[in-house]
Image (spheres, grey):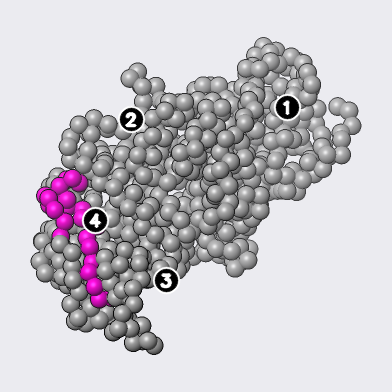
Amino acid sequence: MKSKSKDFLEAEQRFLTGENFYAQHLLGVHKEEDVFIFRVWAPNARQVWLVGTFNNWDDSLPMTLRKESGIWEVATLLPAEGDMYKFKVRQADGREILKIDPFAVRFEDRPGTAAVLHTVPEKKWKDGLWRGRQRRSKTLQRPLNIYEVHASSWKQHEDGRPYSFGDLKEELIPYVKELGYTHIEFMPLMEHPLGMSWGYQLTGYFALSSYYGTPAELRDFVEECHLNNIGVFVDWVPGHFCINDDTLPYYDGTPTFEYADPIRAKNNRWGTICFDLGKPQVQSFLISSALFWIEMYHIDGIRVDAVSSVLYLDYDEGPWTPNHEGGNRNYEGFYFLQKLNSVIKLAHPATIMMAEESSSETKITGLIESGSLGFDYKWNMGWMNDVLRFYEMDPYFRKDNFRLLTFSFMYMMNENYILAFSHDEVVHGKKSLMHKMWGDRYKQFANLRNMYTYMMTHPGKKLLFMGSEFGQFLEWKYDEQLEWMNLEDEKNLKMQHFTSTLNQLYKEERALWELEGQQETIEIIDADNLDDTVLTFIRKGKAKKDFLIVVLNLTPVERHDFSIGVPYAGTYQEIFNTEMEEFGGTWTRHNDTSQTIEKPFKQFDYQIQTIVPSLGALILRPEKIQLRVKKSGKATTLKGGKVETSPK
């Protein structure tokens, strides 16, 4: 090859030092005038050839090694749009194997693994209004309610073919909008060879899986979401990758993308290979991938999968090698995640970064300067496990295990949390959320409504896996569509209506998100009522009048004249009752408006009394309340948002 331009040499050097965050412009395939230039990083290969449909997969196109970088390259006039290709690599031990292009943007249909020459058409985006609003707003102080989706099993064609993103644009977006979710989160969309992995064992980090349609279809889908005020997140897997021999593992016959230590390289639990996150070239590769999805597809956020496996050397099954201090911290993984978040936030401050992480040893959210990893949110796995264990329990034992429901109040401000009932909770014999619930079918739905209300009113953002919104009974199956026939049952249809109503209430009530991340967002009324097993608390907004009273009855016993402490004298109106007939319950009308009684209740000077339905949850809003102002000796009445002052 002829001498390179200064820009090329700088890009090459940045790739080697882990600072090229657009490595796809250096490696992969690029068209310059009429010539295609192919490049691949394989520093210890003896020889590499470009092979494909354009040269009958033979050795007629040997590539040249740039020794200083380990990048092989070749320029050719032969290929055309749509041609398939691979790199034939004579590895360090002399073995010859066909390998994928790690930077390809498209692959042939499964089970084939060849890359496809594909130019993503230019797009004139129309989502500027949405993106501008995201840049100007603070994610913590706005509603965030996520519908988690596995793209190929949400709905399928009659012949079993998965919906493409063209199909999902027509049906999924209106569905999510009607149900009141603010965001869709997709399980990994990147190329992967085995559907059974659900997309978590990747091969093509820059390629939308051909199983889901074309890049243009995904871009149109995201744009349509934004035009309907719906954000889009994707799952992304930087910890480990598919073990298939023709993909990334031991690319040039030596540890290339993976750790040199075979113990660290092998992920026994998942049967995969772990990235060497301390290697500069791997950092360039992975951070480039993340930015590519954000910029190519206007993705609003990334959920980083399996963060614990990146942070801890002893996370996997089997032997492990301690770090230089003798501990279990994977420092390469820790600093890589900090670098990932700092790079993305510098380039795209509004992008939301989320971590699926189950331990409490490492600070996940917050400023990197304070020692955290720099994520915006962490999935609260402890909350999820405790809550599901509680709701699966016979109510007879719940009073003795009430702490499962209330323990999260002790640590809920330690991180910025997402409360997630995800796909992981409805597979592998764990049963669906509906099926987990205690009791007969009626009580299962009642428990499910109660649990969703607890999730929606507890501090933290929200996530629910598809199918759970209407109480699907069977576990999720990755190769079958949801049980849409369930909606022919009135109970499931009413459950879906309940979820939609609850979602809308969450978006409308500022008290449920306006002070998120601040202790002032919640005040516990009574978390010690073990005999009745009823939990009560207040969620607050910035204005004194913006607060809600939440009441959760965790037993199948209706509570009459139930006392609830309240902060102000006045009247309180029930605005939500999970046992209304329209939701699948038996109540045909709401409780009457409650008038306060001037009688102390714990830290409160006043209380109200109401009926709390069996296994029911109530939400009450102040209707007309009086604020005592000590200095003037006057009472301020808040009624319908209007302030009136009168003598005390």
Q: Which residue is mark 3?
A: 519
Q: Is residue 28 above or below residue 58?
A: below
- In percent of width and height, residue 74 lies at 78, 24
The residue positioned 61% from the left and 63% from the top of the image is 368
Residue appearing at x 57%, y 59% in the figure: 374
> Magenta span has 516?
no
Q: What residue does disc 1 label?
A: 30
Q: Earlier in the sequence, mark 4 or mark 2?
A: 2
Comparing labels 4 and 2, the label whose residue is closer to the camera = 4
- Who is closer to the viewer here, 168 or 512? 512
Whether pointer 4 and pointer 2 mark residues with C-beta atoms closer than 8 Å, the reply is no
Q: Which residue is mark 2?
A: 481
Cβ atoms at labels 1 and 3 below 8 Å apart: no
Mark 4 vs mark 3: give the one in front. 4
| Mark-to-mark CA distance, 2 and 3 | 41 Å
State the residue position of label 4.
576
- Alpha carbon distance from label 2 to label 1: 38 Å
Q: Amino acid at mark 1?
A: His
